[in-house]
Image (tube, rainbow, N blue to C red):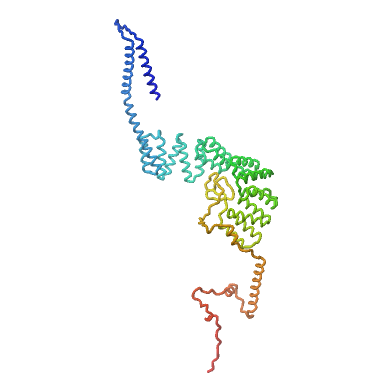
Amino acid sequence: MIRLVIFAVLVLVLGYGFSWLADRPGDLSLIWEGQLYQTRLIVAASALIALIAVVMILWWLLRTIWNSPYSVSRYFRARKRDRGYQALSTGLIAAGAGNALLARKMAARSRGLIRADQEPLIALLEAQAALIEGRHDEARAKFEEMTNDPETRELGLRGLYLEAKRLGANEAARQYAEKAADNAPYLPWAAQATLEYRSQAGRWDDAIRLLEQQKAGRVIEKAEADRLRAVLLTARATEKLESDPAGARDDATYALKLAADFEPAAIIAAKALFREDKLRKAASVLEQAWKSAPHPDIGRTYVRARSGDSAADRLKRAERLEGMRPNNVESLLLVAQAALDTQDFAKARAKAEAAARIEPREAAFLLLADIEEAETGDQGRIRHWLAQALKAPRDPAWVADGFVSDKWLPLSPVTGRLDAFVWKAPFDHVDKTVDESTTISIDSALKTLPPVRDGRTERMASDHRIIELERAATIAEAVRPSSKPPAPSKQAADAATSPEPRPFFGGLPDDPGVRNPAAEPEPKTRLRLF
């Protein structure tokens, strides 16, 4: 476009110049070797411009002829390079599709058409072809060659990292990831792997620093960065809780500012404040977290804030939390447990049944079983509630990669992933098909609840049966003959007293009219007189 504009401007300038000369006629005289040459001015200008054009054309022709060998060689070289890049493109596509034979063939053709030191993608194609064919040693050698070139260093480190992970060489994988993260913290895979490795080693300060670099480089979104930093701060606060409560409180409080709905941070902050005897502030932190999302760990921490409190005081605090979130399952279960501790069975039963009516799950029925055991001690009713708990859905827990934990952890113990634990109901190891006929209902459970039995009457009947058995054994001992043979050994006595096993098939019929020859007495011998 610029060249076109320049050409148009030149044409306009020449046209304007010729028109200006045409409006101002004149003659041009030249004396050379005694001869006078005279012409008009516009003719002389036209001749001069034509002469310049002829010289330029002749110069172009001479330069083209002079550079023709180089031009011809450059043409063939460009054609060869284009064929090489075409083969390289075909090989990369074949490697992505898993065609190892075509990828290897195209890699060899590319290396023959293009210099490998000028095109690093050839080494990548050969490494990918080796990985598809299962020649991992050759692939690792190619990746190590890539790390020597600044242009392909990051690609080589990633290949070596993936190979180390495949072989289970976690230490080597960690070194490759940290080297890549130090050279290029904007690489998501390197930064994420290094962040997890540093977290697994407990290097929370280094992990937070790396996370800040990612956030500054806009590798990670601000919301995700704040969430991960809250997790790291909470993990560091958990380690500081016993030795440095003030530092744990600062970290957990800042984590709550980054993620207001993060329950573990609220619990750690409250525990740190408890250790500093700041009960009112700790209670405020837990109350705010409870209003945001009721969690059983928050409720237990709030209710048992002071170890010396009575059960009645704990019940009052549980009822205070219930007032903040009424008609909530966690609130009702918390009050029911506190009421059970105070022996207020009526309130405990009412709250537990209300919780089971809202959400019939395992914890509600187990709590009803505990109430039944403490109040009546009826084993039938206790077993009834335990059976309902077995059929009910499981309670929520901290779950990460199939692993269920009773407390929050910053990392998954299965994969080492950061912020992997989620508060949800864990899946059962055995899949169950739940239909409408097996749906748990507190009303149906109450209808099928057996009546309370009198424990005192049952104990008297049991004692009476024991006395009767002892009396029968005494009578049998008394009616035995007094003349006894020599006392046999203990083994013989046990064998003699144990009944003879009766065969399942081939025994005598149960008809009382059929006599048992073994049980009949031997006939007496009579004297016959001849």
Q: Nearer the viewer, residue 224 or 472?
A: 224
Name, please, the residue furthest toward the top.
34
Residue in the image at 35% along x and 31% along y: 78
Q: Is residue 195 visible?
A: yes
Name, please, the residue furthest toward the bottom.
530
* Placement of 517 over or under 39, stated as above or below: below
Q: Is residue 517 visible?
A: no
- Report x, y in % for residue 325: 63, 48
- Report x, y in % for residue 283: 66, 45
- Report x, y in % for residue 264: 60, 45
Q: Nearer the viewer, residue 412 or 389?
A: 389
Q: Nearer the viewer, residue 403 or 161?
A: 403
Residue in the image at 53% along x and 54% along y: 428
Q: Nearer the viewer, residue 130 or 476?
A: 476
Q: Which picture quadrant has residue 444? A: bottom right
Residue in the image at 61% along x and 78% along y: 486
Q: Which picture quadrant has residue 363? A: bottom right
